[in-house]
Amino acid sequence: MSTEVRNWDVVAKALEAAGNTSSEMYIRAAALAQGKLDPMPTSSPEAPYSISAVAG
């Protein structure tokens, strides 16, 4: 499991614990934590699993 996938897993679990499973952030975090494609992809096709392409 990559660091990024682990980070998304932490986010998903924290949102689950808070009862916030209907938010777009949870939907995104849960999908990425499971290694699925980003359900809210960026405009960068080079980063289908990540939002990191927009950070720089």
Image (cartoon, rainbow, N blue to C red):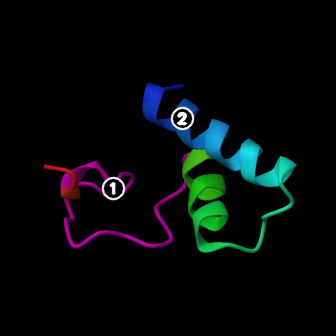
10 vs 51: above or below: above
Indicate whether residue 40 is drawn in magenta. yes
Q: Which residue is found at the position 56% from the left and 62% from the top?
A: 28
- Say whether residue 25 is left or right of residue 19: left
At a point 44% along the width and 35% down the height, the residue shown is: 4
Q: Residue 1: x and y, percent?
A: 54, 25
Amino acid type of the residue that numbered disc 1 sits on in the rendered structure: Ile
Q: Badge 2 is on which residue? A: 7
Q: Is residue 43 magenta?
A: yes
- Element under disc 2: helix
Of helix, strand and loop, which one carries label 1? loop
Q: Earlier in the sequence, mark 2 or mark 1?
A: 2
Count of numbered marks: 2
Q: Main secondary structure of the magenta part?
A: loop
Question: What is the spatial separation of the Cα atoms under label 2 and label 1, in whole angstroms?
Answer: 12 Å
Report the residue that reaches farthest toward the front: 18
Query: Quarter of the image holding residue 19?
Result: bottom right
Q: Tell whether 29 sits left or right of 12.
A: left
Q: Position of residue 21 (x, y in %)?
A: 78, 65
The residues colored magenta run 35-53
Residue type at tag 2: Asn
The residue at which mark 1 appears reads as 51
Image coordinates for residue 15, horizontal then vertical, percent: 74, 53
Q: Are marks 2 and 1 in contact (CB under 8 Å)?
A: no
Whole-percent x and y of residue 50? Answer: 36, 51
